Image: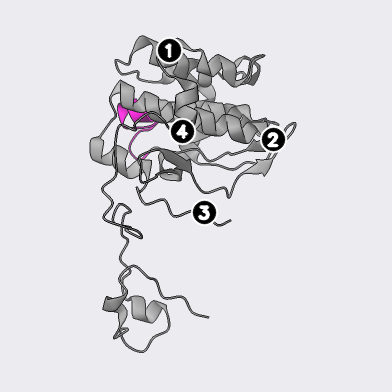
């Protein structure tokens, strides 16, 4: 899949630099993600990998969802175990058949992480087994920060263990999400048309500016690419990677 270049970097990077987002900022990004998920679901596409690393910021600060490696056409249910551990819904962990509601569950996790700085079941050095046990136990074992009460309510409705009772998967679908009190002041038509200014505008110096993305230097890159010595012209192309043909 080929995407447009999105120069603003990952939401993950912005969140780590900010530690956590104020309620209005988290609400803005959550609302845009809700619109994106509903768009995909209307096409019978289940996304299955929602997390801050896969949400990119465009030059105007609005989001684009990236990395569709786990996305799948789904008009009923699927059962593949895939996704990012902190964001997996209980039914995925339980190897049960599941539907597009797992994306709404992940949005609940995302809102929690944006407001607190960490996913709800996260602890340092937690093992996957313990993490999955806590996810299956549900929100009752979460240490809740002092969130806005409406935000807490929406997170709980998204992270409902029973998919048949989960927000986004009820009779009115995404309409229930849009009508929730936490989103009361959101003008969904204006947001959909990107007529609302984003809370953060990336600093972009020009076309092709990739400075908003993290850099991951390679140790001994010449040997890794089969070169006998360092590329003498590499410093002239700092934003390009060598790829053997």
Nearest to viewer (mark 2 / mark 1): 1
Measuring from the top left, give residue 198's x and y in whole percent: 34, 33
Task: Give how far apart the Cα atoms at labels 4 and 2 are.
Answer: 30 Å
Image side of residue 190 versus residue 18, left or right: right
Look at the image and say whether residue 118 sits in the magenta stretch. Answer: yes
Residue that numbered label 1 is attached to = 184
Task: Give how far apart the Cα atoms at labels 3 and 4 are.
Answer: 33 Å
Disc on the earlier residue, 2 or 3: 3
Measuring from the top left, give residue 67's x and y in whole percent: 52, 49
Residue that numbered label 2 is attached to = 44
Quarter-of-image position of residue 18: top left
Task: Give how far apart the Cα atoms at labels 2 and 3 are.
Answer: 20 Å
Nearest to viewer (mark 1 / mark 4): 1
Disc on the earlier residue, 1 or 3: 3
Classified by dominant secondary structure, the portion drawn in magenta counts as loop
Which residue reaches farthest right? 76
Tags 1 and 4 in contact by the CB under 8 Å rule?
A: no
Residue that numbered label 3 is attached to = 3
Disc on the earlier residue, 1 or 4: 4
Secondary structure, mark 1, is loop
Relative to 133, is 162 above or below? above
């Amino acid at each position: 899949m080929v995407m447009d270049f999105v120069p603003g970097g990952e939401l993950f990077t912005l969140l780590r630099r900010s530690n956590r987002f104020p309620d209005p900022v988290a609400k803005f990004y959550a609302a845009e993600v809700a619109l994106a998920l509903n768009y995909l679901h209307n096409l019978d596409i289940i996304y299955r990998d929602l997390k801050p690393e896969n949400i990119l910021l465009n030059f105007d600060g609005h989001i684009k969802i990236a990395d569709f490696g786990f996305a799948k056409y789904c008009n009923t249910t699927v059962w593949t175990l895939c996704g990012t551990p902190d964001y997996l819904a209980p039914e995925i962990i339980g190897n049960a058949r599941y539907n597009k509601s797992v994306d709404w569950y992940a949005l609940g996790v995302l809102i929690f992480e944006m407001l607190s700085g960490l996913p709800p079941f996260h602890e340092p050095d937690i093992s996957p087994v313990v993490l999955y046990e806590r996810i299956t136990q549900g929100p009752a074992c979460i240490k809740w920060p002092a969130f806005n009460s409406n935000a807490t309510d929406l997170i709980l409705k998204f992270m409902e263990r029973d998919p048949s009772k989960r927000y986004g998967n009820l009779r009115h679908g995404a309409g229930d999400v849009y009508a929730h009190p936490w989103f009361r002041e959101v003008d969904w038509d204006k947001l959909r048309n990107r007529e609302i200014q984003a809370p953060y505008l990336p600093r972009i110096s020009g076309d092709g500016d990739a400075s908003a993305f993290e850099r991951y230097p390679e140790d001994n890159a010449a040997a890794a690419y089969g070169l006998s010595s360092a590329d003498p012209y590499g410093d002239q192309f700092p934003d390009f990677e060598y790829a053997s043909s």
